[in-house]
Amino acid sequence: MIDNSIFENKKAAYLTLGCKLNFAETSAIGRQLSQVGVRKVRQGEVADICVVNTCSVTELADKKCRQAVRKMIKDNPGAYVIVTGCYAQLKPEDIAGIDGVDIVLGSEQKLDIIEHLDELKKKDKGQVYTTKTNQIRSFVPSCSQDDRTRYFLKVQDGCDYFCSFCTIPFARGRSRNGTIESMVNQAREVVAKGGKEIVLTGVNIGDFGKTTGENFFDLIKALDDVEGVERYRISSIEPNLLTDEIIEFVSKSKRFAPHFHIPLQSGSDAVLKLMRRRYDTALFRHKVETIKRIMPDAFIGVDVIVGTRGETDEYFEEARQFLESLDFSQLHVFTYSERPNTQALKIEHEVDPKIKHARCKTLLDLSDKKLEAFYQSQQGTERKVLFEHTQHDSMMYGFTENYVKIETPYQENKANEIKVVRLGMFNKVKTALIEA
């Protein structure tokens, strides 16, 4: 048992890389440390404890994690350094070998951090505490507030899908979740703190219920009844798990925003098979068309990967034409990165890096065109905007329920408030300006 007196007057610095789920979990780690007396470091101070929560979605992400850890060590000389997250789970020894790292915590250990701090004694070499991925069982709830206004509620963790290009199931384990009751209670806590918008996060949130005998549809119905929440957003949800029932419910719900983020990954059925995805383009088209038929003003974001092994010129052109034909709002384009121990490495055809870059640019240009068309369709409409706390160049920003980003001169009394506005012209960065 650690003597909590060692934490008195200690200051901690936190750095999170990667997804919103990581941010929610870092927030939970911060709450654990604050409960034993550790406060967050202020600007200009040197931290006594450093926590880096890492990502490993691409090779570049791994590199950024190593750089971030080294910078944290340099900026906080003598600090006790803890590294956790997906990269820590997948390659713990790589991180433990970085001079200045004290402990490396895997996915099972990250949210039980106090038990592993060993009196905050600096180590000659980083000590590794991890669990084999197939033995990861725990689900620890977490909910974080970003630096603007939104809260991110972790409803699910892990994934059972094992797509050929992805290491996430190896980093986070099998699909698991908390109960609907616990999620509702956390939503009520957000209301008590003055929060107005909650984003539901997870690795594969549509798979919610695997460990509790519940399901995602029942979860959103229960959350919709929590008084005081102005709006929810559903983060990335697999197209095969985004049921027509869920779409219909969102269209009529009290609080769920007409905003969907759906990973496609490729618009070629041949490439989807190589990726081991659980749907085809016909199903994906059906989901997009269903959303737009019921909610014409809904925002639809789509994830795509370019340059995967097996993506020939013909297959990429199929994907481009498919995307061109879809009524979505924006693409999130990722360049394929080789990941160790994935099945994709067995696919023979490799794409030249220059071709990957060209394909990425092609789809980003398409995304710009689609986003501009969506924003133009919203011009002159009245929308509810939740204004954010932060300001840049005397301007403040906010998002409508259907995810149109707006800007207006900063007014402190508008922060974290929802106002009805009429959307005006669009500037060069495609931000809607409120009409006077």
Image (cartoon, grey):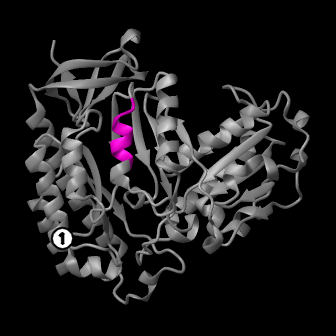
Q: Nearer the viewer, residue 298 or 51?
A: 298
Residue 221 among those drawn in magenta = yes
Q: Is residue 99 magenta?
A: no
Question: Within the image, what quadrant is residue 149 found in?
Answer: top left
- Residue 169 to residue 189: above or below: below
Residue 254 against residue 99 in the figure, above or below: above
Which residue sits at x=60%, y=39%? Answer: 27
Please state the total of marks drawn on the protein image: 1
Stretch of the chain drawn in magenta? 219-226
- In the image, is 2 to the left or to the right of 157? right
Give the percent coordinates (x, y) of residue 257: 27, 38
Q: Please tell me which residue is depicted at 63% across the width and 59% down the height of the picture.
A: 138
Q: Tell me the quarter of the image containing the C terminus.
A: top left
CA neighbours of label 1 inside 10 A, class few (<14), some (14 to 19), many (20+): some
**Residue 382: x and y, percent?**
14, 23
User: Is 129 in front, or is 185?
Assistant: 185
Q: Is residue 380 left or right of residue 252?
A: left
Residue 330 in view (yes/no): no
The image quarter containing residue 86 is bottom right
Between 100 and 217, the residue placed more toward the observer is 217
Which three-letter amino acid code belongs to the residue tagged 1? Thr
- Name the one closer to the observer, 393 or 370: 370
Q: Residue at x 22, y 54 (%)?
A: 245
Q: Which residue is mark 1?
A: 281
Residue 110 in the figure: left or right of residue 310: right
Residue drawn at 42 percent across, 81 percent down: 344
Considering only vertical position in the picture, is 305 above or below 276?
above
